[in-house]
Image (tube, helix red, strand yellow):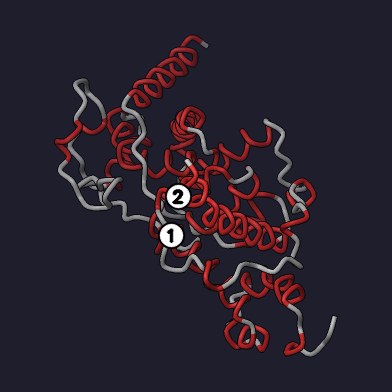
Amino acid sequence: MTDDPSKLSCQQFQAMLPELIGTGEDIALHPHYRSCPLCRALLADLEAIAEAARQLMPIVEPPDKLWNQIESAIQKEENTESRQ
Amino acid sequence: MTRSRLPTQSPAPIPDPDSGRQQPQADALPVRLAPENLAQPLEPTVLALAQAGDHRAFAELYALHKRRIYSLCLRMVGNSGEAEDLTQEAFLQLHRKIATFRGDSAFSTWLHRMAVNVVLMRLRKKGLSLISLDEAMEPVSEERPGRTFGAPDLSLAGAIDRMALERAVADLPAGYRLIFVLHDIEGYEHNEIASMLECSIGNSKSQLHKARLKLRDALRTYPRQEGRR
């Protein structure tokens, strides 16, 4: 692997991505990113996925029956405790 | 945890999960004395009453938090039946332990963490080794870093369909889904995830990256699959 970041291959750059992304570095400043349209497209997609996940995943309503089940289970536990 | 991603705890009005807009509570009121039928005072009062053993207050806490907890479970396991079971277990745990809540963190954060632990316990019982996620899910040949990722004209940016994303997340392998949900949807940081899953921070970062790559592949594949139907 080369030490010169401007001479990294896509493979080498992409191997570094989890750490670069995870530490919040400004990847747009990386020489490989600036010179490689494929890796820029990859990063754009990954950012779009993360953003979409934050914005689009809905809050889902559980079925009404679930509270009845929980209430029954609580009652059962309390009855068991009171008998002990 | 990234608080800004969490919804507010305001008890009313209830958000419409489909549109994100607010909807009147009267829309789906069950007949019997369900939590939605109760008046909704401020949570601190409800919390204190529930801690003192008040059943109506506990029902109200359920009404306030059920969507968040059920949605969390659903995303983590990708199965509605199991999500119901886990939601039930989480609220049973809450009922057993609510008196021990001392307010060191927000109640919603405490409950959320409790639900995450319930799900993780279940996954461990089912044999998902959270310690060796990397080894268990080493990418197959086409996922290796050496692969040249798609051409710019296949870029997803700006074109992610909500239903396709939900389906792609549900289809992720369990370990990938777990970390993606905890980080990108629920807003946990890598150090928190590493602590919860008993793995390294580097492992968490690596798994998240792989999960996003798999989602990218899936999102680029779905439209073509549907087009062949």
Left or right for A43, reference B227: right
Left or right for B188, reference B126: left
Task: Find numbered disc 1 in the image and state the secondary structure of the residue it sits on.
Answer: loop
Residue furthest to the front in view is: B228
Query: Which residue shows up at 75% across the image and 72% down it?
Result: A11
Instruction: Find residue A42 and report its horizontal and vertical position in percent.
Output: 59, 70
Instruction: Find residue B148 and report its horizontal and vertical position in percent.
Output: 69, 69
Left or right for B12, reference A70: left
Neighbour tally class for label 1: few under 14, some 14-19, many 20 plus, Cα within 10 Å:
some
> Which labelled disc corresponds to residue B178?
none
Q: Which residue is mark 1?
A: B160
The CA span between labels 2 and 1 is 7 Å
Vertical placement of residue B99 versus B103, above or below: above
Q: Which residue is mark 2?
A: B164
CB contact under 8 Å: marks 2 and 1:
yes
Choose top left, top right, bottom left or bottom right for residue A7. Answer: bottom right
Query: Which residue shows up at 46% across the image and 33% down it?
Result: B87
Q: Amino acid at mark 2?
A: Ala
Task: Find numbered disc 2 in the image and state the secondary structure of the residue it sits on.
Answer: helix
Question: Which subunit holds the residue at mark 2?
Answer: B
Q: Amino acid at mark 1?
A: Ile
Query: Which residue shows up at 46% across the image and 57% down it?
Result: A53
